Image: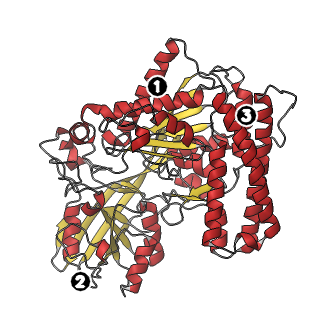
């Protein structure tokens, strides 16, 4: 348990002052069809950490509020400085919207859910699953892509994650009124939505007054853990995680994920009663404060960074279990092969086909959930699982059990399916004597991404021919050791009491790609937060950033670091392969450390 300061609203208001004065009610509406929504009058939607303000200004429409959207406005001759920008909730994360608006000179933000951006158009709740006209999507404004966690601790580390401009979350009803009152240039075709308005860019004649007053309150964060012990208590754990906090009810986010994780834990515990014992511990983690900016998971990671070890062999995260119909999986390279094998064993409840056939190839996990501190501070392998990516009641009052039963997951069949996947995946990662991480996937990923850098910036790798040749050479010897390990791991038997020794070598091999002590997002040399979206992921971020700004010295340095990382990872795999073959002569692994400078 640890103490944090959370933000709560005291006064929030919005009024149209021109052309026809009108005060808006920021509350959502109670629905007779969903008794849980009766609390609407007591639940004032807000965007956490918004600075206090009392301002009046003309309105402009700024699309998703992404950096490129403000560039579109500039080219259209729309001056956004000192204006209030109306932006859509989808697209880039809220913190990036705030940062982009701040850099553009905007004075305030209004964020609404655009019905056009929900994919397939379906009736709004309670008639269907889509966002209704009164729904307001809450969330945090922290720039957690710069550093997640308690903003006070981030500032102590030299990173200011607090927003600098005020922002309010509003409904489609309010957004439609404002959009109807905007003149100015017509929008780009893909900016026009489904509300009854022309979606002109402005500014004005619509003018609004927005007031925000908030307070910070002390709160206790409680991360909850449960463990199924492994045969080797010294082995690093496999963590299956979810978060415990929610906006209002959170039946989907996070409770549908919580239900699946608990069901998987129950299944594995019952297997344990029948004699099953994994080689390494399986830890079930329920992190607090995720919605405010990954407060609980970040604090937990921070406390473990000092040891120099990876916090886990793998972290499997389930933020929301059932958002829509199709399974969505993301995973860092190395965890994808074992996941594909599990998905081939489980059938999709709708189509009857295996999930391996219907789910597509995994992408890199993003940075907008409890996966972020694992990805951004370390080289810990991460996977994220759940059905769907978007749902109509997201962060609204209407994320209720009634919504789930009627539209989200009738009969809870997808929740049950996800629980099967989680139990099988956790078992597949924790049970074998050799941790089944596919280092060959890592080699393939790195080679592909480096070729992509060369294609985008043809001269970049050629800047430093000797270092580039070293990188190619080290990747080659790493790949040979990786393929050898993958073959041994796949042929290995069941649980073993000596898993800890080999797992230690594998964490050293993975940790070779880490950069302990570097800024958040640079904790792994192979991936980090996307500079465009904030919450998405980007491959080889330090190298791409350096070549993108034509910084040859930094690019050469990063190429050298990558070469060194592959060399050191290869050293650990060589020893692991020798041990796996029964040669226990090496007393210690060469270069035994978890990071490479």
Left/right of residue 27 with respect to residue 344 in the rendered view? left
Residue identifier under label 3: 504
Q: Mark 2 points at which residue?
A: 183
Between the C-alphas of marks 3 and 1, the distance is: 25 Å
Q: In this view, does 372 lie to the left or right of 125?
A: right
> How far apart are labels 1 and 2 at the CA level?
56 Å
Task: Report the disc number at residue 265.
Answer: 1
Position of 452 relative to 433 (above/below): below
Furthest-top residue in view? 274
- Count of numbered circles on the image: 3
Residue at 45% in and 41% down: 385
Task: Choose mark 2 or mark 3, whichever is in front.
Answer: 3
Residue 528, image x, y percentages: 59, 56
Helix, strand or loop under label 2: loop
Q: Distance between the residues labelled 2 and 3?
A: 63 Å
Q: Is residue 564 above or below residue 83?
A: above
- Mark 2–mark 3 contact, CB under 8 Å? no
Asked if the residue at tag 1 contacts the one at tag 3, i.e. Cβ–Cβ closer than 8 Å, the answer is no
Mark closer to the chain start, 3 or 1: 1
x%, y% of residue 58? 29, 79
């Amino acid at each position: 348990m640890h103490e944090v300061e959370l933000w709560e609203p005291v006064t929030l208001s919005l009024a149209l002052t021109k052309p026809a004065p009108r005060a808006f009610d920021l509350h959502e509406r109670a629905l007779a069809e969903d008794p849980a929504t009766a609390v609407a009058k007591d639940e004032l939607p807000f965007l956490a950490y918004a600075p206090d303000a009392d301002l009046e200004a003309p309105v402009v429409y700024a699309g998703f509020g992404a950096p490129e959207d403000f560039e579109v406005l500039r080219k259209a001759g729309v001056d956004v400085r000192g204006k209030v920008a109306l932006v859509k909730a989808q697209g880039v994360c809220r913190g990036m919207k705030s940062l982009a608006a701040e850099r553009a000179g905007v004075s305030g933000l209004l964020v609404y859910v655009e019905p056009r951006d929900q994919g397939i158009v379906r009736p709004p709740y309670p008639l269907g699953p889509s966002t209704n006209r009164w729904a307001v999507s809450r969330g945090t404004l922290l720039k957690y892509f710069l550093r997640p966690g308690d903003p006070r601790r981030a500032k102590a580390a030299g990173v200011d994650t607090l927003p600098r401009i005020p922002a309010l979350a509003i409904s489609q009803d309010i957004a439609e009124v404002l959009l109807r009152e905007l003149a100015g240039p017509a929008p780009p075709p893909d900016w026009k939505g489904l509300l009854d308005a022309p979606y002109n860019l402005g500014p004005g004649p619509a003018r609004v007054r927005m007031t925000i007053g908030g307070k910070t309150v002390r709160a206790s964060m409680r991360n909850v853990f449960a463990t199924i012990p492994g045969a080797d208590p010294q082995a690093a754990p496999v963590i299956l995680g979810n978060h415990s906090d929610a906006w209002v009810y959170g039946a989907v986010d996070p409770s549908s994920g919580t239900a699946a994780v608990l069901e998987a834990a129950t299944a594995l515990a019952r297997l344990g009663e029948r004699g099953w014992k994994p080689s390494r511990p399986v830890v079930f983690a329920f992190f607090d404060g995720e919605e405010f900016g990954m407060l609980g998971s970040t604090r937990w990671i921070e406390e473990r960074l000092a040891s120099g070890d990876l916090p886990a062999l793998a972290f499997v995260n389930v933020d929301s279990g059932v958002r829509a119909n199709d399974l969505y999986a993301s995973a860092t390279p190395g965890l994808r092969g074992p996941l594909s094998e599990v998905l081939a064993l489980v059938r999709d409840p709708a189509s009857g086909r295996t999930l391996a056939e219907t789910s597509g190839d995994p992408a890199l996990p993003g940075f907008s959930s409890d996966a972020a501190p694992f990805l951004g501070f370390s080289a810990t392998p991460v996977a994220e699982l759940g059905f769907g990516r978007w749902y109509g009641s997201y962060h609204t009052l209407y994320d209720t059990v009634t919504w789930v039963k009627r539209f989200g997951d009738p009969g809870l069949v997808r929740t049950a399916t996800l629980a099967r996947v989680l139990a099988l995946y956790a078992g597949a990662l924790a049970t074998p004597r050799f941790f089944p991480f596919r280092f060959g996937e890592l080699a393939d990923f790195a080679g592909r991404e480096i070729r992509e850098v060369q294609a985008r910036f043809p001269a970049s790798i050629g800047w430093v021919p000797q270092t580039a040749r070293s990188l190619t050479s080290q990747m080659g010897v790493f790949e040979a050791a990786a393929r050898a390990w993958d073959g041994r791991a796949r042929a290995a038997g069941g649980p073993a009491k000596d898993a800890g020794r080999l797992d230690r070598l594998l964490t050293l091999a993975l940790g070779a790609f880490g950069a302990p002590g570097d800024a958040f997002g640079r904790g792994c040399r192979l991936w980090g937060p996307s500079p465009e979206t904030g919450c998405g992921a980007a491959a080889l971020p330090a190298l791409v950033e350096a070549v993108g700004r034509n910084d040859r010295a930094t690019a050469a340095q990063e190429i050298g670091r990558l070469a060194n990382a592959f060399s050191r990872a290869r050293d650990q795999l060589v020893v692991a392969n020798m041990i796996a073959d029964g040669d226990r002569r090496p007393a210690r692994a060469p270069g035994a450390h978890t990071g490479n400078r």
